[in-house]
Image: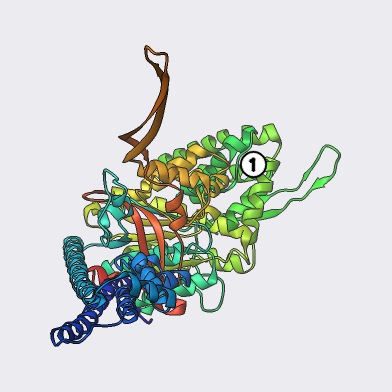
Amino acid sequence: MNIISHRRESEERAAALTLAFVDPICAIVAGLGLGHYAYIAIESLLHGGGGYRPFHVIFFIGVALIVANPMAPLAALAKGVGYPPSLFSKARGNAIAFWAGVAIVMAAGAPTVIAWVQTSVSYFDYVGTSALTLAALGAFINGFGRAFTALAEAGQSAATHAQVKGKNRAQRTLLAGGLLLCGGVARGIFRERNLAVGAPQQGTVLLYGEHSARRGTIVVGSPGSSKTRSKVYPDLFWGLKTAPRAGALVFVTKRRATIDCYRIARTFRPADRIHVIGIGSQRETMDITAGMSHESIGDAIRDGIGASNSDFWIHGPAAFTEGFIEIIQALAPATIAVPALADKDGVIQPGNEAYDLTIGDTLPTLLQLLVLDARRLDAIFSYGFQRADAIKDSRSAAALRELLREVKGRTFPLLQREAKLGEEFRQSVLPQLQPFARGVLRETFCDRNGIDLSLLEQGRVILVEIDETEHPRAVGAVIRMIFRRIVQMARERTASNRAGSLDPILLLCDEYTNYAAPGHVQAWNTIRESDFVATVGITSISALAKQLGGDQNATNAIVANFANKFFFEVDDKLTRDLARELIGQTTVLRRGTTEGTSQTSGNSSSVNMTGSSHSSRGTSRSESSNEHREDALDGAIWRSLGAAHEYATAIAFVRASDGVATDVVTLGVLDPAEGILTALPEEYGVSH
């Protein structure tokens, strides 16, 4: 992987400081030239000769004004062809002086002007020589003054930059030894807007350590905003680099992303510690329900079935899946025969069917259970009670009978009320699970001999690839099942007696809006408390709310679970409203000046009856200032966000150990496919 240092801003800063010296140096050169001509004229006058003619004096002074201010036209021209205005922020070219010089040079070539000067100015030899001398002195003083100002600003800028770099190094040293993530390099915009709290200096690197990273990071940005290359990929890179024993689980819905994430992981982990789960000869397999409790499997199915008003829909999924998975666990291995039965019309219903319950808690098993009717389910219960009667241990037999009664009591009233599994339920769940009944999806995600997620505890990297373009119906089912397995792992890690010494596990959920569920509200809270370091990418708050069935409360709760938030280029109103509320308001001082004129008139009369009139005019001027609060985040800041080849800009809201830092930040790009790695801001005092 080629590493390209991100030096664009430092190069622009150095160029701006260099350009600041162009005009002062040229002014000094112009002064030297005028001084040379003035010396010749003075020496000629002392020896009884004459000075310069009017044309030469006027021409020399005009040329000197042009030479002393070259940045005035150059800056305007460069800005017009696309150079950034910040490049000329310190180059203060005097456009008035430049164009005055142009006018004077043109006047020197006009015969009428020269003739007027010759007839109007007496003793021009002495006047012209004096004008050249004064112009030379003025150019010298102006040049040296501007050079001194530029030098002082350069020194101040260098001192500030060195101070910021020192703080960045100190921050990096302070956070070293644990997992570390980078929130970009501050641009100082909110500090300039007088934001009261958390506005960093320009050039400050927003680093946050494991404690803050565990509280979660959400990245919001429309397609093309570079949120994946500038935040999601770098979080994987920084996490694996700074925490050598950390595991990582990445959900991938695009094949190119698998290649990118594999290259990033391969930088820090050997190939035998990286597992790519997916469809294909070079991919590994897994059982996505292995190790899951019946509650977790029930939660995963509920996450994906949507909602309905039927009784079965409200209560049935949990009762059915949780209850019958308990039955599977209690009775397996078992083969259950369903006898043939004639209905009320004498038609023989299919029978002599055998159901093998040795498969375990896999999606195909759930699929088989979902298509059973009440008669077939009754056969399973009958078999269960027979097994209980055959158990010699009375306590175990009583426990099995109690389980069978409790599960049957939960499910059969619903089945009898609706005659079979609710049609709405079947129509919603079956399309999600049907792809796992046979074929490549079953081979990939229902293999009991495949990779288990417990390997994450050993510092392994697992990439779960399920291409949404090839298997759109299966994406949600796969990721929701795995997500619920992660929640179960999180609970186990929290309850572990090793909770204080657990290694972190990176959890990257890009394109989260494709598989979010209302049931994840509490899930994210559980994950956050168990040393999982989550980075979630979504396109907008509105898109997340739509995925959650329009439940704005669930949307707000999920977003609130992520302490660190990054807003890339996005036009969504809900997203912008959230960012505005998070960042808050700033105090703005406004000064105003008002001017007015008034006029009065009147008549006066005397004893002799003669009269006269008079009028008077008056002017008034008043200044006022007032402070008021307004949103720190306005449309101009949103319009300044964007993505380029090697960097992107975003609004960062980072909760670190020393408080909240908020600013518009520059984030480098990590793009293994193109060999770009500018996501390490070494130019700002953070080495890699």
Where residue 500 appears, as percent x and y from the top left, is 22, 53
Q: Which residue is mark 1?
A: 378
Instruction: Answer with left or right where residue 441 lies relative to residue 38.
Output: right
Of 107 and 394, the residue lying toward us: 107
Q: Taking the image as drawn, is residue 688 in sight?
A: no
The residue sitting at 27% across, 78% down in the picture is 26
Q: Residue at x 52, y 35 (%)?
A: 406
Question: Label 1 neighbourhood size at 10 Å, few (<14), some (14-19), many (20+)?
Answer: some
> In the rendered view of the protein, which quadrant contains the N terminus?
bottom left
Relative to residue 299, is residue 80 depicted above or below? below
User: Considering only vertical position in the picture, is 417 above or below 166?
Assistant: above
605 sits left or right of 539 in the view: left
Residue extending furthest toward the left: 46
In this rendered view, identify the residue nearer to me: 300 or 570: 570
For the C terminus, give its image quadrant.
Answer: bottom left
Amino acid type for the residue under numbered disc 1: Asp
Question: Regarding mark 1 in the picture, which secondary structure is present there?
Answer: helix
Question: How far across and down, in percent of the image, does residue 412 sit?
Answer: 62, 35
Judged from this view, the residue extending furthest toward the right is 345
> Residue 340's spot in the image, x, y percent?
75, 48
Render colour scheme: rainbow
- For the view shown, which residue lies furthest in the front direction? 608
Q: 627 or 530: which is nearer to us?
A: 627
Residue 212 in view: yes
Total label count?
1
Where residue 235 sits in the image (x, y, percent)?
36, 64
Please report the residue visible at 44 percent of the width from the left and 57 percent of the height from the top. Answer: 640
Quadrant location of residue 49?
bottom left
Residue closest to the eye, 455 or 217: 217
